[in-house]
Amino acid sequence: MTKKAESMPLAPRFIMIGGFLGAGKTTAIARLANHYRSLGKRVVIVTNDQAADLVDTLLLRSHGFDVGEVAGSCFCCDFNGLTQAVESLGEAGRPDVILAEPVGSCTDLVATVIRPLEQIYQQPLQIAPYGVIIKPSHGFKILGEGGGGFSPKAEYIFRKQLEEADFVVLNRIDELSPERVAEIEGMLEREFPGIPVLRTSALTGDGFDELARQLENSVSPARRQMDVDYDTYAEGEAELGWLNAQAECDANQKVSLDQFLVGLIALLQGQLLAHQAEVAHLKAIVMADGIQGVANLISSQSKPVLSLPAGGQAKRFDVVVNARVGIAPERLEAIVRDAFMLVGEEFAVDCRVKTLQSFRPGRPVPTHRLVNDAASE
Ligand SMILES: Nc1nc2c(ncn2[C@@H]2O[C@H](COP(=O)(O)OP(=O)(O)OP(=O)(O)O)[C@@H](O)[C@H]2O)c(=O)[nH]1
Ligand SMILES: [Mg+2]
């Protein structure tokens, strides 16, 4: 006991940032990673997806971060994959901070990841309070009167994510008036009374000093207990078509990588709208020699955004697309293959799809599920 307490100050801090698809987890993690790096700390990041070829991993690596990926299963269902990734990242030097991004359609992460790290994992870690990011447009749709866009089972996952948060991070305040901020905070307080809400913009950095302070707190031993109906959770996840694809592209003339990327996302958006398929998050990264660019579409109604402009041209480049959309995976695959062909015609580029995985997420079967905190047992 004493020995563990003595070693605590040296233990890496484990910070997991959850939240629904497209809420801003990767953007927030990149900002936090820069913050800790600027303080001279060694930072590592663990990303997670149901499949390989993850845009987030490539994006975070392009910022120079040391990133390990748990691919093929979520952290909760591959707990050992998470701890192995943490250990591999530690081989190059003990990290001070481990940032982890779970899959955006996952919930019950306190019981399946945080408590097992605290109670089962043999290596000492300082576990930060668990923050869950919320995108205001999701909040208004799901917690407000209107509804729409999401199925009740997807909404169930969204609500469960918030219910288990130690604190909620209301993101994208750069786009909200003070009245709208107050309105959504009222909705959160009504449904999740007592959970602190921080206001941030992962884009501008507003609110990140407070977020960093919050993450230094210790976790309350009386963490809430949460019941989860795994049937509803599994059915909610399975409503999504999930696709990761990678293509190699060649042209005779140099093409603007940003125009190509936005063209690709816009084509996909048009096709998905025509199928009335709700986009949860569609993102693509383009990679040429030393240049990367990322474009995102965070809902069917919004505009494609270049979150990382490539700012250059190339004749040969790779593109990775990740799509999480309310549509059958076979249909999604056909749409993505068509979009590569059409954007290729538009820009006179030959795009060959090299890898493609398209599926519905399987039922979550956690490696561990601990419902009580050791301190309260
Ligand atoms: N305006 C604005 N855009 C933001 C903010 N935070 C993130 N974004 C944008 O929102 C999009 C999605 O952000 P990500 O960080 O990729 O979201 P995510 O939660 O990691 O998404 P998944 O990993 O797919 O679940 C990107 O285009 C970001 O640039 C913000 O505070 N304000
Ligand atoms: Mg992400």
Image: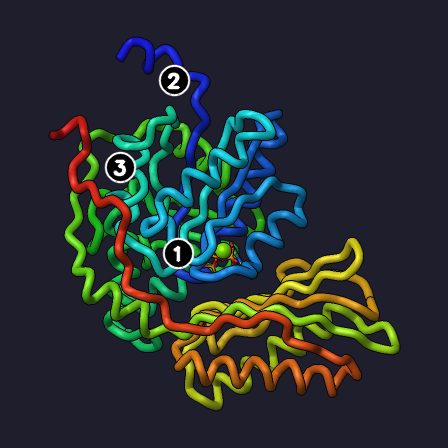
Q: At numbered mark 2, what does the secondary structure look like: helix, strand or loop?
A: helix
Which three-letter amino acid code belongs to the residue tagged 1? Ser
Q: Which residue is mark 1?
A: 73
Q: At numbered mark 3, what does the secondary structure look like: helix, strand or loop?
A: helix
Quote the CA–CA distance across marks 3 and 2: 17 Å
Mark 1 sits near ligand 1, with its Cβ under 8 Å away: no
Check the image and name the residue furthest to the right: 253
Q: Residue at x 27, y 32 (%)?
A: 120
Check the image and name the residue furthest to the bottom: 274
Which three-letter amino acid code belongs to the residue tagged 2? Met
The colour scheme applied to this rendered structure is: rainbow
- Asked if the residue under mark 3 is in contact with the one under mark 1, i.e. CB atoms within 8 Å, the reply is no
Q: Residue at x 51, y 51 (%)?
A: 26
Q: Which residue is mark 2?
A: 8
| Left or right position of 167 against 308 | left
21, above or below 263, in the image: above
| Left or right position of 356 against 258 | left
Instruction: Inspect this view and state whether residue 179 appears.
Output: no
- Asked if the residue under mark 2 is in contact with the one under mark 3, i.e. CB atoms within 8 Å, the reply is no
Q: At numbered mark 1, what does the secondary structure look like: helix, strand or loop?
A: loop
Q: Which residue is mark 3?
A: 115
Mark 2 crowdedness (10 Å alpha carbons): few <14, some 14-19, many ≥20: some
Instruction: Inspect this view and state whether residue 242 appears.
Output: yes
Name the quadrant of the C terminus. Answer: top left
For the residue pair 302 and 237, the one nearer the viewer reads as 237
Residue 153, located in which quarter of the rendered image? Answer: bottom left
Q: Earlier in the sequence, mark 1 or mark 3?
A: 1
Q: Position of residue 94 (x, y in %)?
A: 53, 25
Q: Position of residue 361 (x, y in %)?
A: 36, 67
